[in-house]
Amino acid sequence: FDSCNLIFESKSKLDKHVNIFHQTTICKCGEEVSVIDFTNHQKDDCPYRKVNCEYCTIEIIYKEKYNHETACGSTTVKCEGCSKYIRLKELPFHICGEDPPSYSDYGGSNYRNDYGSDYGSGSSNDAYICHICNSNCYDFDALQLHMA
């Protein structure tokens, strides 16, 4: 309890304080969390927390969100305005009558497809490029945070 600077007048009050504020529990993700912070951990930080897919709105666990939304966002729907098939993740940026952007529009040979494979060089050292805004991310986790 190094971070707790409270002083108690009796051992029973100390014990009560410890039981309320300093007990920990193990989350299903394996992290040890104080009981008092457990609800916030499950809601905001736990990789096994429930979230909704941005595209199909089904409930998934956060740990699988990026892979699910990559696949789900790659499914196509027919635009009611121009009858072209557009990927769900590109639909908010679609302008009827225009062709969807080509891979070269997103950085050419450095672009990584939806499954993490490089187009072009084949090097695993290439930056991860955001397919929406063309930002460079230094690794997969940075791209996932950027896309969130």
Image (spheres, helix red, strand yellow):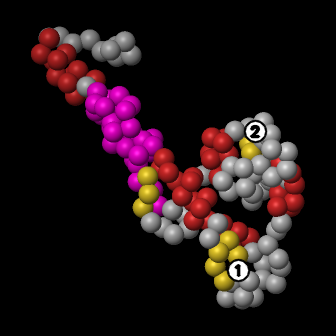
Residue 84: x, y in percent?
74, 83
Which amino acid, mark 1? Answer: Tyr
Q: Is residue 39 magenta?
A: yes
Q: Which residue, given by chain and number where applicable, does mark 2 sit on?
A: 124
Quarter of image, res 1: top left
Closer mark to the observer between disc 1 and disc 2: 2
Q: Secondary structure at mark 1?
A: strand
Q: Secondary structure at mark 2?
A: loop
Q: Residue at x 35, y 28 (%)?
A: 32
138 shown above or below 49: above
Q: Is residue 55 left or right of residue 45?
A: right
54 shown above or below 148: below
Q: Residue furthest left?
A: 12
Looking at the rendering, the stretch of residues picked out in magenta corresponds to 24-52
Specify the label residue 52 is tagged with: none
Mark 2 crowdedness (10 Å alpha carbons): few <14, some 14-19, many ≥20: few
Q: Is residue 22 magenta?
A: no
81 shown above or below 28: below
Which amino acid, mark 2? Answer: Ser
Quarter of image, res 125: top right
Q: Which residue, given by chain and number where applicable, does mark 1 sit on?
A: 85
| Mark pair 1, 2: CA separation | 31 Å
Q: Nearer the viewer, residue 29 or 7?
A: 29
Quarter of image, res 42: top left
Q: Residue at x 62, y 47 (%)?
A: 144
